[in-house]
């Protein structure tokens, strides 16, 4: 199969100032929501859950991925076809953006409903094309009847977090290189499951930066005005302490582990996390299974999404060039001296050029001291085919 993916590469220079500006780069919403994603089209050979992630043809035919009358994207589990016997037993969806987004990006996800229920394992996350080499950022993830959202990053090598990181969530695992990844538990009680839906949903924003990866969450009533206004340029300097912070540090050379990221939305059932007996038993009874007598109902196993939006701290004018930058497993810059303060800065990188590296290292150091105003320089956009 041949996939064409464009890789957005932006670099930026930072001067003294007070705002942290981002410009809209991509909006997945409304009738066009499903443009620009690839459907997995295979059984779940990754997390060994009991599902078939259908292709686009079947997704449409089975009404598993569509835009509803309110103009929101629905991604759901087949709750009418029971296929006992050999796995996989049930059809669901996994879609991945064709585009890759580099350092300097801000991913915003606005949903009114997340899939939940016994055996259900939804996620909104990002990854490099090569996994695990290109890294993984889990922005929204939970299993079964878990009450609150769990965030995490995964690195294919040594990277760790610590209690001293400033974030509003509570720290879980601290070794990002293990199967669990390093985890942070959201404290907002309306961040997952039924409580999320009852609050009218909410919004997550994830800053993917050379200085760190920062995730904010707001329940519907608290979403900041710059996001509810659908503005094409936003300033995030008033957002405050994020729910989860994964700063670049001496304990974690982020740019070594994170390549440009593609966004993934999926629903698994049972499998490597939701289906582990001790985990399943903590919120559900019996054994995880998705079919046959006593299997869970899937009437709440759906995403309802207002939009997925990507902003950038660079001014991006897409052009097409052949490049393998998106698939090498490295982000291309060297910035390891940032402190574990959890306070985000804006910057972009990813060109892999050493002169840019020097500028970026300088920028990371100066940004914290003087605040940030962006003068942006577009390094280029690569379209890679493989
Ligand atoms: C899983 O299936 C997909 C689609 O058939 C394939 O491209 C991929 O290589 C498989 N992955 C593993 C780990 O087997
Ligand atoms: C979609 O998946 C179905 C069942 O797996 C298969 O029969 C069909 O050929 C696929 N369609 C495309 C366009 O790949
Ligand atoms: C789920 O239930 C079906 C039907 O009872 C059975 O065939 C299958 O082996 C079960 N799967 C698991 C993983 O327990
Ligand atoms: C990913 O990690 C595995 C296990 O440590 C290692 O064998 C592999 O070489 C790593 N891949 C890359 C591209 O670094
Ligand atoms: C928000 O703005 C984007 C970009 O201008 C546009 O594509 C989208 O339709 C807007 N959404 C709404 C709900 O107005
Ligand atoms: C951090 O990672 C970058 C990109 O792989 C590498 O060039 C640099 O040498 C690493 N820094 C340290 C201190 O290991
Ligand atoms: C399937 O779930 C949908 C909600 O996603 C619900 O409206 C519908 O009634 C359910 N169908 C069955 C047969 O349970």
Image (spheres, rainbow, N blue to C red):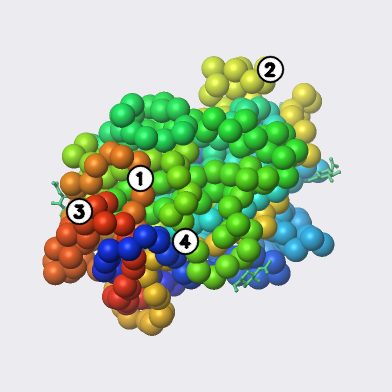
Residue at which label 2 appears: 285
CA separation in Å, label 4 and label 3: 21 Å
Q: Position of residue 219 (x, y in %)?
A: 63, 42
Q: What element carries label 1?
A: loop
Mark 1 crowd level (few <14, some 14–19, many ≥20, 10 Å Cα): many
Question: Which image quadrant is residue 318 in?
Answer: bottom left
Judge from the rendering whether residue 49 lies leftward or rightward of residue 214; answer left or right: right
Quick check: is the Cβ at mark 2 less than 8 Å away from ligand 3?
A: no
Quick check: is the Cβ at mark 4 less than 8 Å away from ligand 5?
A: no
Given this view, does label 4 or label 2 mark the residue nearer the observer? 4
Mark 4 crowd level (few <14, some 14–19, many ≥20, 10 Å Cα): some
Mark 2 crowd level (few <14, some 14–19, many ≥20, 10 Å Cα): few
Q: Position of residue 306 (x, y in %)?
A: 67, 57
Pointer 4 or 3: first along the chain: 4
Q: Which of 357 and 226 is in front in this view?
A: 226
Given this view, does label 2 or label 3 mark the residue nearer the observer? 3
Q: Which residue is at a point 28% across and 33% down the rendered structure image?
A: 160
Residue 194 visible in the current orientation: yes
CA separation in Å, label 1 and label 3: 13 Å
Residue at which label 3 appears: 365
Q: What count of labels does the image hold?
A: 4
Q: Which of 338 and 119 is in front in this view?
A: 338
Pointer 4 or 2: first along the chain: 4
Pointer 1 or 4: first along the chain: 4
Mark 3 crowd level (few <14, some 14–19, many ≥20, 10 Å Cα): some
Q: Do the residues labelled 4 and 2 touch (CB within 8 Å)?
A: no
Q: Which of the numbered marks, if any, corresponds to residue 343?
A: 1
Residue at which label 4 appears: 235
Q: What element carries label 2?
A: loop
- Locate the C terminus by quadrant: bottom left
Q: In this view, does 283 lie above or below 238?
A: above
């Amino acid at each position: 199969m041949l996939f064409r993916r464009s890789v957005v590469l932006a670099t930026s220079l930072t001067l003294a100032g007070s705002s942290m500006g981002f410009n809209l780069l991509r909006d997945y919403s409304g009738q066009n929501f499903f443009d620009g994603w690839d459907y997995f089209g295979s059984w779940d050979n990754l997390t060994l859950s009991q599902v078939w992630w259908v292709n686009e043809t079947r997704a449409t035919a089975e009404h598993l991925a569509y835009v509803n009358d309110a103009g929101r994207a629905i991604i759901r589990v087949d709750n009418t076809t029971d296929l006992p016997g050999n796995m996989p037993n049930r059809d669901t969806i996994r879609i991945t953006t064709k585009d890759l987004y580099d350092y300097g990006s801000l991913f915003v996800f606005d949903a009114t409903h997340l899939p939940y229920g016994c055996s259900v394992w939804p996620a909104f996350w990002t990854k490099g094309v090569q996994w695990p080499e290109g890294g993984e950022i889990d922005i929204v993830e939970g299993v079964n009847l878990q009450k609150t959202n769990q965030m995490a990053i995964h690195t294919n090598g040594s990277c760790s977090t610590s209690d001293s990181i400033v974030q509003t969530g509570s720290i879980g695992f601290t070794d990002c290189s293990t199967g669990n990844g390093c985890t942070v538990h959201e404290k907002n009680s309306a961040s997952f499951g039924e409580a999320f839906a009852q609050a009218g949903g909410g919004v997550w924003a994830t800053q993917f930066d050379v200085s760190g990866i920062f995730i904010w969450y707001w329940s519907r009533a608290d979403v900041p005005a710059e996001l509810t206004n659908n503005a094409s340029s936003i300033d995030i300097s008033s957002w405050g302490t994020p729910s989860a912070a994964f700063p670049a540090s001496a304990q974690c050379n982020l740019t070594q582990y994170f390549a440009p990221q593609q966004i993934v939305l999926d629903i698994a059932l049972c499998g490597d996390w939701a289906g582990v007996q001790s985990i399943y038993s903590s919120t559900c009874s019996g054994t995880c299974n998705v079919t046959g007598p006593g299997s869970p109902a899937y009437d709440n196993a759906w995403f309802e999404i207002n939009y997925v939006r990507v902003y950038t701290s660079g001014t991006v004018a897409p052009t097409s060039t052949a490049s393998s930058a998106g698939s090498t497993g490295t982000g291309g810059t060297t910035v390891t001296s940032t402190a574990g303060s959890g306070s985000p800065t804006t910057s972009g990188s990813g060109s892999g050029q050493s002169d840019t590296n020097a500028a970026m290292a300088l920028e990371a150091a100066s940004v914290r001291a003087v605040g940030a105003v962006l003068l942006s320089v577009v390094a280029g956009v690569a379209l890679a085919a493989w």
